Image (spheres, rainbow, N blue to C red):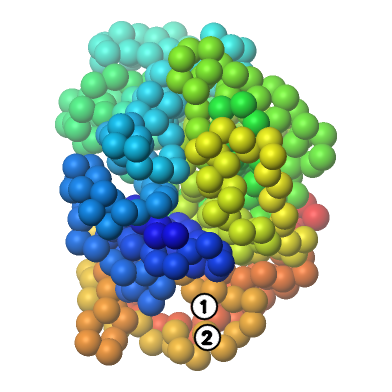
Amino acid sequence: MKVLVIGSGGREHCLVWKISQSPKVKKIYCAMGNGGIRSLAECIDIKETDISGLKKFANKEKIDLTVVGPELPLTLGIVDEFESDGLRIFGASRESSKIEGSKSFAKDLMKKYKIPTAKYQTFTSKDKALIYIEEKGCPVVIKADGLAAGKGVIPSKNIDEAIAAIDLIMVKKAFGDAGNKIIVEEFLTGEEASFLVFTDGESVIPLPTSQDHKPIFDGDRGPNTGGMGAYSPAPIVTRNLHAQIMQEIIIPTIRAMAAEGRRYKGVLYAGLMIDDGRAQVLEFNARFGDPETQPLLMRMKSDIIPVLEATIEGNLSLQKAEWDDRASVCVVMSSKGYPGTYQKGFEITGLKEVSKIKNLEVFHAGTAIEGSKVVTDGGRVLGVTALGHGIKEAVEVAYSAVKKIHFNGVHYRYDIGNKALSIS
Ligand code: AMP
Ligand code: GLY
């Protein structure tokens, strides 16, 4: 079969890598891809937001299955558009992806269906928001309602920080129309974990647990990024907690979406805060996480294609997925300056040498090919991902490779996986 993957990051390189291992797959295209994806797929020059261009391509090339990585095309309705032409596509519909595209929608859904989450209020007026914050007291978290590439969430320790956050979102419009509405939320403490499931709207196949590292610097300091590393499993999610998450969060959310006329098909990603052995939802995403997908799919032993197909066809209950018992760790290597501004075009060396390391994959994110060189082409550049017997071994293998890879201005965290080691 012919598969089209939409997206250009580390998550998409990992999806292409996993899909390429399926005996059912003969050819993979990727829109738009990156320097690493190029070796496994034919990269095509159509933007992820050009839905009609992508649909035309899929029709022309008779694509059998399209897999969507990022949230933006989902919220723009790529799944509905493709399905209206009878094209098979994996991802949440426009109506379902609202669970990520509008934080107020997600919060109202959770409130209505009693899914555990932080207390909140929604505001379209800056002044009313400030009165509420003064009444409730800080700390609070201020969130832009719409999509903001992971940057629209601002924790505020005191009223001055809250004023600055509201100003940035609602007055300066740092995230455009995504900031027309804000959510002011109770500040939760604890440890975060990511919980992803495949669902056809009724049945669920949970992926193993994982944990992201959002802040740019060691010790979770500095501004939030798209994610500087991830590991799986997340030992904070005990067997009991796993059951609570399934019973109180995942199943009720999928039922709630169906009850609201938004049957959810695809990957549902719950970002959780865990405190005192209980989980609350910080956010939902309507897609695979990046970088969580890298360690998760390294651990997936089964062919991913039948799982994706069963999700689309609504017969996931007949499917099983097998996972490697080993742990996996992904260390993201980024450009100096990210998540702010950064330079591109620096040569990356050491990739050939690390390709010989066993149980290791280097997933490319912001890379490009220039002649015979691989060069940096984005904020997050590479996701160096290893398997090991336990997190400790996976960490050692991943960092042994990271140390051999160089580019001008390279940055990475030295403490990916440490939290798991302190728990287990
Ligand atoms: P979100 O995009 O909503 O997951 O927010 C991004 C990050 O902000 C999360 O991964 C948390 O680190 C933090 N965050 C979001 N909501 C809260 C909250 N209510 N309390 C504390 N931290 C939060
Ligand atoms: N790693 C966080 C996300 O994919 O949203």
Q: Quadrant of the N terminus?
A: bottom left
Side (left or right) of 69 relative to 369: right
Q: Nearer the viewer, residue 63 or 200?
A: 63
Judging by the rendered image, the residue that carries numbered circle 1 is 402
Residue 354 shows which numbered tag? 2
Question: In the rendered view, would you say 29 is above or below 105?
Answer: below
Crowding near the residue tagged with mark 1, few <14, some 14–19, many ≥20 C-alpha atoms within 10 Å: many
Question: At numbered mark 1, what does the secondary structure look like: helix, strand or loop?
Answer: helix
Side (left or right) of 217 relative to 192: left
Between circles 2 and 1, the one closer to the viewer is: 2
Side (left or right) of 89 relative to 206: left
Q: Nearer the viewer, residue 87 or 304?
A: 87
Label 1 CB less than 8 angstroms from ligand 2: no
Q: Is residue 162 visible?
A: no
Instruction: Choose the circle earlier in sequence order: 2 or 1.
Output: 2
Type of the residue with mark 2: Val
Crowding near the residue tagged with mark 2, few <14, some 14–19, many ≥20 C-alpha atoms within 10 Å: many
